[in-house]
């Protein structure tokens, strides 16, 4: 167990080799009802060979185990006797421990050469009888439910999307990792081959761009399947589960790096991004990487005590990623943190990016019939975060609709309400996120930002740009 963040960092550097977990082997633990504290350091468990060099952290050996290494042997006649001995040894050990099912007990022992020769004539080279046959290749698919689209479709069928770039480990009897692979753009994967008949799959939310964790000083969030007998994994993460929450965040980060940044030509955040997924959390934030051993993003599943929906998880994640992108090009605007004008500028940019990116993604997934979470009361505002456009100036806080108003074609002041609500005038349109981000970089006031947009870009509506910057200036005087 690491005693401080330095020892934790040392462990995590070796995670690919150690395959760390906070779940004790062969022991079912109760699901937590509270998220780990930022400074909580858990006990880690690992299964390694005797030759593995354990990092210099306090540890103790719980048990000495024996796993045969037949997976390192090729299907060659010179290896038949050794393969047969090692597989029979494991068979007998599992029989004595009572771990064999009726099918395996009925199969009994088998001459490996006989099983292999029979397997040559069968599909994919696997024997139809006996425990032993040619090596097989674990594979499968990993998908996650987009519950907001399940609700919109409303036909009784869940709406799933792939989970790309996740690591999938193949565990011998649920313990020892014998192979691993990475999911592709369709959520599918395959691994190297193994002799092991009974395996569990372990999906780790770790890839080229993201490291999702349940706690700030925790292992990579993961999900473990039940037992498969030479079978392909079919993993579908449904609404309300921790694995769905982790997969939605993981997907959002992947989408931001691989599709969103190139689409809008904005700046990449530093990568890989570490994310603390707060299943019971009600707040989210970007943490500048100047704070050591701290996740870059913290994402809460809830908003004001209620589940955000899958588009809300996506939107919140890209909001905080946009802060990370902004920080990568202009660290100065993040200090001092208590400067109200700079906070409004940062948050208005991230809020506008969240609205634009989320609506674009879900229209790609579902088409123009997509109606997002946090939509407004009027049909014209029935998109994700549309409620922001229905705010009067006196209701605005740091998260103003300034950036979205610079891009959209709607003057919300033309929308009339019987209760006398008056929305701000917005006659400006047509600016891009790239232009808005570039003008924001280096700006330290709303006037700086506005002046750069006017001076650096030609826009036929720039004569009305004061419409939105004036209401943002007024929002500084509100009580927040």
Image (cartoon, grey):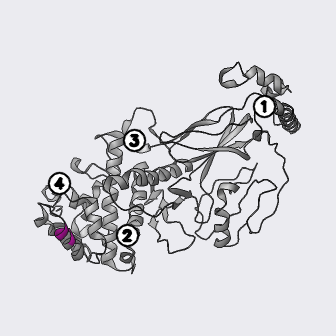
Badge 2: how crowded within 10 Å, few (<14), some, or many (20+)?
some
The C terminus appears in which quarter of the rendering?
Answer: bottom left
Q: Residue 413: where, in percent of width, then height? A: 14, 59
Based on the picture, tell me whether residue 225 belongs to the magenta stretch. no
* Numbered disc in front, either 1 or 4: 1
* Numbered disc in front, either 1 or 3: 1
Q: Residue at x 15, y 57 (%)?
A: 411
Q: Is residue 370 above or below residue 88?
A: below
Name the residue carrying label 2. 329
Looking at the picture, tell me which residue is in the foreground, 112 or 421. 112
Tell me the SS state at disc 4: loop
Q: Tell me: 103 left or right of 368.
A: right
Name the residue carrying label 1. 76
Outermost residue, top direction? 121
Per the model, the C-alpha gap separating discs 1 and 3 is: 51 Å
Badge 4: how crowded within 10 Å, few (<14), some, or many (20+)?
few
Q: Which residues are magenta?
A: 452-456
Per the model, the C-alpha gap separating discs 3 and 4 is: 26 Å
Name the residue carrying label 4. 409
Name the residue carrying label 3. 149
Along the polypeptide, which appears first: circle 2 or circle 4?
A: 2
* Numbered disc in front, either 3 or 2: 2
Q: Is residue 97 above or below residue 403?
A: above
* Numbered disc in front, either 2 or 4: 2
Per the model, the C-alpha gap separating discs 1 and 4 is: 69 Å
Tell me the SS state at disc 1: loop
């Amino acid at each position: 167990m690491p005693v401080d963040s330095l020892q934790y960092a040392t462990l995590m550097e070796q995670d690919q080799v150690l395959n760390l977990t906070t779940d004790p082997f062969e022991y079912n633990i109760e699901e937590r009802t509270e998220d780990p504290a930022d400074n909580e350091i858990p006990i880690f468990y690992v299964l390694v060979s005797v030759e593995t060099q354990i990092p210099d952290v306090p540890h103790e050996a719980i048990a000495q185990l024996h796993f045969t290494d037949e997976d390192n042997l090729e299907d060659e006649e010179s290896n038949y006797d050794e393969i047969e001995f090692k597989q029979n040894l494991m068979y007998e050990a599992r029989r004595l421990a009572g771990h064999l099912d009726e099918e395996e007990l009925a199969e009994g022992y088998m001459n490996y050469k006989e099983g292999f020769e029979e397997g040559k004539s069968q599909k994919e080279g696997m024997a139809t009888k006996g425990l032993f046959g040619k090596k097989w290749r674990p594979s499968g698919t990993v998908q996650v439910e987009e519950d907001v689209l399940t609700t919109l479709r409303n036909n009784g069928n869940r709406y799933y999307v792939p989970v790309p770039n996740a690591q999938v480990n193949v565990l011998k009897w649920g313990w020892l990792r014998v192979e691993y692979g990475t999911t592709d753009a369709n959520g599918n994967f395959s691994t190297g081959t193994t002799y092991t008949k009974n395996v569990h799959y372990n999906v780790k939310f770790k890839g080229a761009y993201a490291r999702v964790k349940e706690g700030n000083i925790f292992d990579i969030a993961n999900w473990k399947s039940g037992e498969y007998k030479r079978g392909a994994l079919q993993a579908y993460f449904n609404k309300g589960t921790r694995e769905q929450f982790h997969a939605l965040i993981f997907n959002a980060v992947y989408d931001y790096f691989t599709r969103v940044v190139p689409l809008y030509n904005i700046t990449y955040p530093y990568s890989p991004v570490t994310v603390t997924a707060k299943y019971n959390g009600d707040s989210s934030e970007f943490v500048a990487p100047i704070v050591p051993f701290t996740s870059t993003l913290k994402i809460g599943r809830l908003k004001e005590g209620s589940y955000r929906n899958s588009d809300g998880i996506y939107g919140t994640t890209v909001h905080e990623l946009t802060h990370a992108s902004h920080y990568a090009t202009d660290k100065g605007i993040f200090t001092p943190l208590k400067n109200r004008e700079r906070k409004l500028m940062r948050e208005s940019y991230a809020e506008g990016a969240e609205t634009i990116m989320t609506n674009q993604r879900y229209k790609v997934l579902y088409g123009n019939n997509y109606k997002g979470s946090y939509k407004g009361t009027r049909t014209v505002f029935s998109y994700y975060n549309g409620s922001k456009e229905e705010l009067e100036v006196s209701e605005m806080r740091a998260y103003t609709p300034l950036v979205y108003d610079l891009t959209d074609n709607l003057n919300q002041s033309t929308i009339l309400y019987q209760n006398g609500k008056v929305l701000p005038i917005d006659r400006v349109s047509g600016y891009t996120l790239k232009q808005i981000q570039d003008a924001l970089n280096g700006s330290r006031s709303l006037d700086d930002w506005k002046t750069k947009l006017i001076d650096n870009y030609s826009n036929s509506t720039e004569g009305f740009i004061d419409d939105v910057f004036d209401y943002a200036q007024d929002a500084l005087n509100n009580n927040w």
